Image: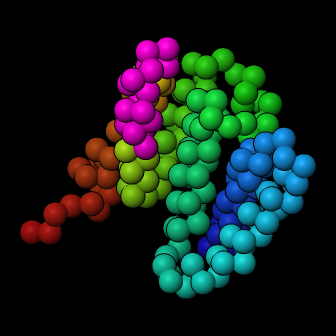
Amino acid sequence: VTLREAVCHGGVITLLYLAGRALAGPHKHGLLIALLTALQVFLSVGKWQLALAGEEKEITVLASSAFLFFYLDHRGLWSLHIVSFSALAPRWRRFLLGALLALAMSIHIQNGLLVVWLLFDLLLTLHKPNLRRQAALDVVVVFIVSAALAGPFFVWLVSAGGGARTPR
């Protein structure tokens, strides 16, 4: 458990560093801003873990943050400067985002709130005709891929042996 939590915490710190760098943009202190963002979370995580006292919290945060940060990169709202992701065709990025969303929801159902984020993003583009079609395509494809990948897992969880049943 400790190794998994340490690796996931490292992933969260890395994503926060990339997010800080993306938000800083061409600012001359962008690296410092990104490092301070990651350091702030690193220093506060001990209190956070004590408050939540759950083992899956780090991996939940890692999966949801990865989806959210890469979705923002895909939509062009910021750039994480990850060339291998940016170089992919949009359809492959949508597929990867759907897989990330399925993984995030499979780790913890609370990550299903990311669906609300997608719907909110779609609503924000309704009044912009030039962005509406692209946002709708992004959201629909991510939904379909995540449902196709996570749907069978949730069906198994409820029906076969996953233990998610209503008490009798």
- Residue drawn at (66%, 78%), measured in percent from left and top? 44
Say left or right for 87 vs 128.
right
Task: Locate residue 82: give its quadrant.
Answer: top right
- Residue drawn at (29%, 62%), measured in percent from left and top? 163
Asked if one can make out residue 26 in the rendered structure from this viewpoint, the answer is yes
In this view, the residue in front, 97 or 19, is 19
Asked if one can make out residue 150 in the rendered structure from this viewpoint, the answer is no
On whether residue 123 falls in the magenta region, the answer is yes
Report the predominant secondary structure element of the magenta stretch: helix
Q: Is residue 52 above or below residue 128?
A: below
Q: Is residue 78 above or below residue 168?
A: above
In this view, the residue in front, 2 or 76, is 76
Say left or right for 9 vs 116.
right
**Residue 12 coordinates in the image, percent (x, y):** 67, 59
Say left or right for 159 vs 72.
left
Q: Which residues are magenta?
A: 117-133
On whether residue 12 falls in the magenta region, the answer is no
**Residue 96 coordinates in the image, percent (x, y):** 58, 32
How is the structure coloured here? rainbow
- Residue drawn at (73%, 27%), measured in percent from left and top? 86
**Residue 55 coordinates in the image, percent (x, y):** 53, 73
Q: Is residue 59 above or below residue 1?
A: above
In this view, the residue in front, 78 or 137, is 78
Count every numbered label the image shows and give the total.
0
Q: Quadrant of the N terminus?
A: bottom right
Q: Is residue 69 above or below residue 50?
A: above
**Residue 125 coordinates in the image, percent (x, y):** 44, 27
